Structures are given as structure tokens and as C-alpha cells.
Image: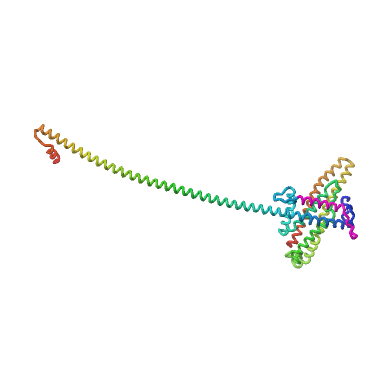
Amino acid sequence: MEQFKIETIAPLTVAGTDLAFTNSSLWMLIALLSIAAFLFIGTARPQLVPGRMQAAVEYLYDFIRDMLRENVGRDGLRYAPLIFAVFVFVLACNLLGMVPFVHSFTPTSHIAVTFGLAMIVFTLVVIVGFARHGLHFFSLFLPEGTPIFVAPLVALIEFLSFLSRPFTLAIRLFANMTAGHVLMKVFGGFVVSLGAVNIGLGIIPLGVNVALTALELLIAVVQAYVFALLASIYLNDAVNLH
Amino acid sequence: MPQFDPASFASQLFWFGVFFTLLYFVVVRPTLPKVGKVIDAREAQVSGDLDRAEAAKGQADAIRTAYDDGMRQARDAAQAAVAAARDSAAKAAEVRLKALAAQLDADAEVAATRLDAARAAARANLEATVADLTTEAVAKLAGINVTPADVSAALAAR
């Protein structure tokens, strides 16, 4: 599990809490800088007929806006920048973790970071829900047409499922990234151990690892998409109450 | 697994908070709305252009209709003019034909009159000549002296 190890780069302790700048922080910073470069270059001189970089930014932004339009409706477009930020941050962390040879680290393979991301979505949903509907937001826990005698049970289940959302959101992303990286590491180990027996035998796990790399890249993109998609579906609850 | 070691949670969450805040407020908020504005402007421009094209098409259709109407009217007018010209030409021809026929009738009448006159003159001449010849023949054959006037009277009496 060496690839998931947190290594302190610059120690920092505030009020007895260890807030050291670690390799996780470094790769989040790299993700932030990559996104910043992408966005600042892409929107430096916005033109009606876009250049390459602007077209790329627009494509990504349109992707998020379409997703919100479909799942939330026109009211959801207000939250497009935040959902975009979440999506692009997850995407950047996932993809940068796949860069070979540079001791890359995947911050999204750690549950603390994915939980932070999930809490952003959860907090947004709660704030938007109460801001738009006030106490009526609680009607979210009682779907329309529920028979009165099962209502308490249904409300309890709905409430628990609502509370579990940040955890499922966090664990889904963390588990996907971790499992994929572990699998690659395992087959990487096979290359060495089987290659030591016979150089020809090492080719097989190497081929598997090539395929796994492609799969991991797919998962990196798909999980970022899933995260943003679920965020917009949860946002729909807050905006439209079912 | 290092993921479940709570010692690093505070640091991870802290730096995540810092970087995500920066990402949202310093990177995304100042840049993305610009692109959104451009996308909206483009949509507005495209739909405006489409509206204008629609309007231009409507205008073109109107012009086309007007052109067709003009053509039809011109054709009708031309046909009417041709028909009128044909009518008036026929009428004029008829009038001239009638005049010509009348002239011919008149000429024929004059000619017939003159013919009658000539015939009458010829008959008179013939009677005079017959009277003369008869007078001479009577004188030579019978030795009776009659005047041509007697012969004429005798002929007239028969």
C-alpha cells in the first residue's frame, strides 16, 4: 500500500493539530494549478467563434450545464460553477494520479478527501433545500401518496438514506480509485515475480496491466462523471422536492 | 491501509478545503461565467440570425408572389389587348369588305345601264339600217318609193 502512503513534505502544526503539507496536498495543488491553467488560458479572450482551448472549456462547461438542465431544470444552472468545480477537481485528481514515473499520488483515493467533496455536495443540497422551501423541505422525506400507517417508517428510511448520501458518495469514489490502483500494483508485482522465473511469463501480467491502465483511465473519468451526476440528482431533490 | 489512519485526516481535509476554496473562488468563479456569457451570446446570435433569415425568406416569398401576380396581370392584359386588336381588325375588314361590295354593285349597275343603252343604240341603228335597206330593196324590186320612216312605221305596226 506504499502508493497510498501520506508523506509529509512540510510539517505544520496549528493548535496541536497536524496540518502538514503532504504529498496528498502537493497533488491537490498540482490539480488546482492544472485546472487554473486550463481555465485561465481557455477564457483569456472569450470569442464568439472559440479557439481550441476555449472550445475545450466550453465543451466541459456545456457538459455540466446539460447535465444540470436535464436533472434539475433551468433553476439548476445557477449551481453549474460549483458542480463544475467539483467535477473538474475530481477529474484532475483522478487523472493526475495515473501519471507514471513521477511518484504521483491520487488524493481521491483517500476517504478524507472524497468525504470533503461529498460534504460540499451535501451542504449545498441542505442549504439550497432550506433556502428554497424552508421547513417544507422536510416533505422530501415523505413521498406523496404514502399510506398513513407506513408513513413513519418511510420517513425514517428516507431520512436515513438522505443522511447516508455523503458517505456513499465518498466511499464510491474512494473505493473505485483505491481498488483500481491496488489492482494495477498487484499486476505490476506479478510482472516482476513471474518475470524473475521466466522473462516470457512476465509478458502476460504486463499485457494485463496495459489493459488495466486503459480501464483505470476510463474509471477515472467515469467516476468524476458519476460524482457530478449524483450531485446534480441530489441537487434536484433540494430544488424541486422530488 | 493508510486511508483509514485518522492521523492524516485533519491535514488532508484542511488542504482540500484550502485548495477547493481557491479553485472555486479564484479560478472557477472569475473565469467560467465569461464562457457562459459567450455561449449565451452565441445562442442569441444564432437564433437572431435564424429569425432574420426567416424574415428575409418571408420577404422573398412576398416579392415572388408580387412578381407572379404582376406576371399574371401582364399576361391577362396582353391577351385582352390581342383580342381587342383582333376584334377591331375584323370589324375594319368587314366594313371595308362591305364598302367594296357596295362599290362593286354600283359599278355593275353602271355597267349594266351602259350595256342596256348600248344595246338600245345598236337596235336603233339596226332598225335604221334595215329600214334603209328595205327602202332600197322595195324601190329596186317593186319600184315603189317608200321612205324609211314608212318602213319603220310598218315594222312598228307589226
Residue found 14% across the figure and 40% down from its top? B156
Q: Nearer the viewer, residue A32 or A66?
A: A32
Question: Does B40 appear in magenta?
Answer: no
The answer to which image quadrant residue A72 occupies is: bottom right
Q: Is residue A238 visible?
A: yes
Q: Is residue B51 left or right of residue A15?
A: left
Q: Is residue A35 magenta?
A: yes
> Residue A240 appears in which quarter of the rendering?
bottom right
Which residue lies most toward the front here? A45
| Residue B71: % across, % down | 51, 48
**Residue in the foreground of this view, choosing between A185 and A190:** A185
* Residue A49 placement, left or right of B71: right
The C terminus of chain A lies in which quarter of the figure?
Answer: bottom right
Residue A111 visible? The answer is no
In the image, residue A3 sits, relative to residue B153, either above or below, namely below
The magenta stretch spans which residues? A13-41
In the rendered picture of this protein, how many numbered marks are placed on residues? Answer: 0
| The furthest residue to the top | B140
Name the residue located 87 percent from the left edge and 50 percent from the top edge: A3
Q: Is residue B41 left or right of residue A18?
A: left
Q: Residue furthest bottom?
A: A149
- Report x, y in % for residue A179: 84, 51
B142 up-or-down from A14: above or below: above
How was the colour assigned to the protein in this rendering?
rainbow
Q: Main secondary structure of the magenta part?
A: helix
Residue A138, how many percent across, how many down? 76, 65
Residue B158: x, y in percent? 14, 40
